[in-house]
Amino acid sequence: MKQAKMLGKISFMVLGRSETFDDEMAKLLKELNVLEVAFGFEVGDDKILKRIKNSQFISVEKNKKAFETCKKYGILATGGIMMGFPEEGHKEVMRTYNFFKKYSDLINKQNLIMVF
């Protein structure tokens, strides 16, 4: 993009994974004029998150770090919110609500998905 003198003339939205998103990646994305990263945050409760993601690598803490890294570099974050899992009670729903509320200034779009 530098060679074609296109750097900064085109903006992008990309998909990201919170467990691999770090300062180095955010800095590069910012240089490429990436304005927004979409993550699969889903919920704010580790027990529910591990069940739906079926991964030992994902965690609410890593999701928080991804939000904080986006904020540091002025990149918007997008994430879906999922609620309604059979084992999800009021406590788990409130963790999800509070997680997304805390970072609402960084979220460009939120998609609420109700699980039946």
Image (cartoon, rainbow, N blue to C red):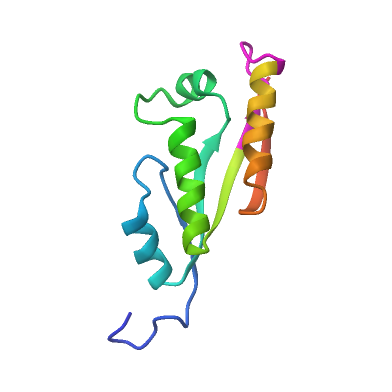
- Residue 85 image point, x, y percent: 63, 18
Q: Is residue 114 above or below residue 101?
A: above
Q: Quadrant of residue 92?
A: top right
Q: Is residue 73 above or below residue 110?
A: below
Q: Residue furthest bottom?
A: 5
Specify the principal SS of the magenta part: loop
Tell me which residue sits at (39%, 84%) in the image.
6
The quadrant the N terminus occupies is bottom left
- Residue 107 image point, x, y percent: 62, 52
Q: Which residues are magenta?
A: 81-90
Tell me which residue sits at (32%, 87%) in the image.
4
Q: Residue furthest left?
A: 3
Q: Quadrant of residue 2?
A: bottom left
**Residue nearest the viewer, comparing 72 with 36:** 72
* Number of numbered discs on residues: 0
Question: In this rendering, would 59 be left or right of 92?
Answer: left
- Residue 78 image point, x, y percent: 57, 50
Question: In this rendering, would 111 be left or right of 42?
Answer: right
- Residue 39 image point, x, y percent: 49, 45
Tell me which residue sits at (51%, 48%) in the image.
67
Q: Is residue 68 above or below residue 95?
A: below
Indicate yes or no whether the magenta region holds residue 83: yes
**Residue nearest the viewer, comparing 24 with 43:** 24
Question: In this rendering, would 79 be left or right of 98?
Answer: left
**Residue nearest the viewer, comparing 45 with 13:** 45
The quadrant the C terminus occupies is top right
Tell me which residue sits at (45%, 72%) in the image.
33
Q: Is residue 43 above or below residue 69?
A: above
Q: Residue furthest top?
A: 87
Indicate yes or no whether the magenta region holds residue 27: no
